[in-house]
Image: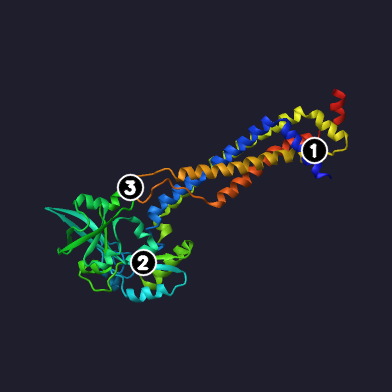
């Protein structure tokens, strides 16, 4: 088999109908370009939207939840031991929100090889005093370094410096919307009243903006020491432990294990944010579906062009077979034509897809809800380019397979006799 001769014949047929060839290649190029651009933009947008929540959400959260005591007095009575007892209006017991023996728990978590890091927290319900009006809010005491390393806390600071929480005593970082409501600037002092009725003065050292306006209207941050002072609690008092794992997939099993081991409530990220995973999956599915449909449409275009080429080149096919070319040789010629269109169109589409994605990546995207985002998000994942190039070849192969098989079955005697 003379492959060089087969390649020369395929090249001649391509150039003989170069306008049709160009149209087919443009169809593949357009499909791949839009496939790459659509996926890059949609997945980049998904990553941005999910990051607003998932970057700030621990893989496993340990906490205590106030709930009714299962061991009610009637159940302990011997007189009602063999009865089903139905009790209404059960009140929560006297358990506290504090995580007991937190130092030992933190030490155990630190020794766990599955854990990337952890950050203790303390949540304090307060009222921000604005004249005669009290604004409901929440102050979260945090370890600034751990929050910055694990939960991208610094990325949400739009004014001031997060480390001032640690360096400046009795300081606070307010949500941007809350600061606007209180009409305070950096350096001002705000008055807060705790749930126990005690009043404290806190210095504003910064603003943060999460991208969720309702959240920013109530949330603020202080150091753990400041939050403990507000609650009137000792230095070991914490209400939450936020854990980041090396593998997010094992979060449900780790949460169940920690709950049993430490005797606390444990919530994994899959349970807490299942709706975001569903939304991301659906958006990605739509993006892939649209891109694949574009490639299939381009494949039909190649199929029609090759069909027309076969009808127009019946004489040439008959001569090839009459001079000794087998049906498999003719089949290879037309498959080579189809794959050549797919390869050239696919590579060109990858190039233009990257260029178009880069253009989108540099378009300004300014919004008050997302101050840290300056341009439209684009995801340059190499997997998209691999899928695009592979699918362009697969699509064009099947588009050329049936016309090529038809050409290989042409009887040269019938064609020549007809002429």
Q: Position of residue 339 (x, y in %)?
A: 69, 41
Callout 3: helix, strand or loop? loop
Residue at image mark 2: 146
Residue at image mark 1: 330
Residue at mark 1 to residue at mark 2: CA–CA distance: 67 Å
- In the image, taking residue 296 as reference, residue 336 lies left or right, namely right
Disc 1 packing (10 Å; few <14; some 14–19; many ≥20)? many
Q: Position of residue 165 (x, y in %)?
A: 27, 64
- In the image, taking residue 20 as reference, residue 267 lies left or right, namely left
Q: Quadrant of the C terminus?
A: top right
Looking at the image, residue 216 lies above or below residue 349: below
Count of residue discs: 3
Callout 1: helix, strand or loop? helix
Viewer-proximal residue among 416 and 234: 416
Residue at mark 3 to residue at mark 1: CA–CA distance: 62 Å
Numbered circle sitting on residue 270: none
Residue at image mark 3: 369
Q: Quadrant of the N terminus?
A: top right
Callout 2: helix, strand or loop? helix
**Which tag, 1 or 2, sits closer to the chain's start?**
2
**Which tag, 3 or 1, sits closer to the chain's start?**
1
Q: Position of residue 391 (x, y in %)?
A: 62, 45
Looking at the image, residue 400 lies above or below residue 266: above
Q: Position of residue 294 (x, y in %)?
A: 57, 38
At 63% from the left and 40% from the top, the residue drawn is 345
């Amino acid at each position: 088999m003379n492959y060089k001769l087969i390649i020369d014949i395929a090249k001649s047929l391509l150039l003989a109908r170069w306008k049709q060839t160009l149209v087919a290649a443009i169809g593949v190029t357009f499909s791949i370009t839009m496939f790459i651009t659509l996926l890059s933009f949609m997945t980049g947008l998904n990553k941005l939207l999910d990051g607003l929540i998932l970057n700030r959400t621990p893989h496993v959260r340990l906490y205590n939840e106030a709930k009714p005591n299962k061991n009610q007095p009637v159940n302990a009575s011997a007189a009602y031991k063999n009865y089903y007892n139905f009790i209404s209006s059960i009140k929560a017991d006297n358990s506290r929100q504090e995580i007991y023996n937190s130092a030992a728990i933190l030490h155990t978590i630190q020794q766990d090889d599955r854990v990337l890091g952890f950050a203790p927290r303390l949540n304090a319900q307060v009222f921000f005093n604005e004249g005669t009006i009290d604004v409901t809010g929440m102050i979260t005491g945090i370890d600034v370094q751990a929050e910055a390393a694990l939960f991208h806390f610094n990325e949400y600071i739009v004014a001031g410096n997060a480390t001032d929480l640690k360096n400046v005593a009795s300081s606070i970082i307010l949500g941007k919307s809350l600061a606007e409501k209180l009409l305070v600037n950096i350096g001002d002092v705000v008055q807060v009243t705790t749930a126990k009725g005690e009043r404290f003065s806190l210095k504003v050292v910064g603003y943060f903006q999460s991208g969720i306006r309702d959240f920013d209207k109530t949330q603020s941050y202080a150091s753990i020491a400041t939050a403990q002072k507000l609650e009137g609690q000792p230095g070991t008092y914490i209400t939450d432990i936020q854990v980041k794992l090396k593998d997010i997939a094992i979060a449900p099993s780790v949460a169940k294990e920690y709950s049993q081991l430490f005797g606390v409530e444990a919530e994994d990220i899959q349970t807490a944010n299942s709706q975001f995973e569903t939304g991301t999956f659906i958006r990605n599915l739509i993006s892939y579906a649209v891109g694949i449909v574009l490639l299939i449409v381009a494949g039909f275009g190649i199929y029609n062009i090759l069909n027309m080429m076969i009808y127009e080149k019946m004489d040439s096919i008959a001569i090839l077979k009459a001079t000794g070319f087998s049906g498999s040789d003719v089949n290879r010629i037309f498959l080579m034509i189809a794959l050549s269109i797919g390869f050239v169109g696919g590579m060109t589409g990858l190039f233009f897809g990257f260029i178009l994605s880069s253009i989108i990546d540099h378009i300004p995207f300014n919004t008050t809800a997302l101050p840290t985002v300056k341009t439209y998000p684009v995801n340059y994942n190499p997997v998209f380019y691999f899928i695009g190039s592979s699918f362009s070849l697969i699509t064009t192969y099947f588009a050329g397979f049936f016309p090529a098989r038809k050409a290989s079955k042409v009887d040269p005697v019938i064609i020549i006799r007809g002429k």
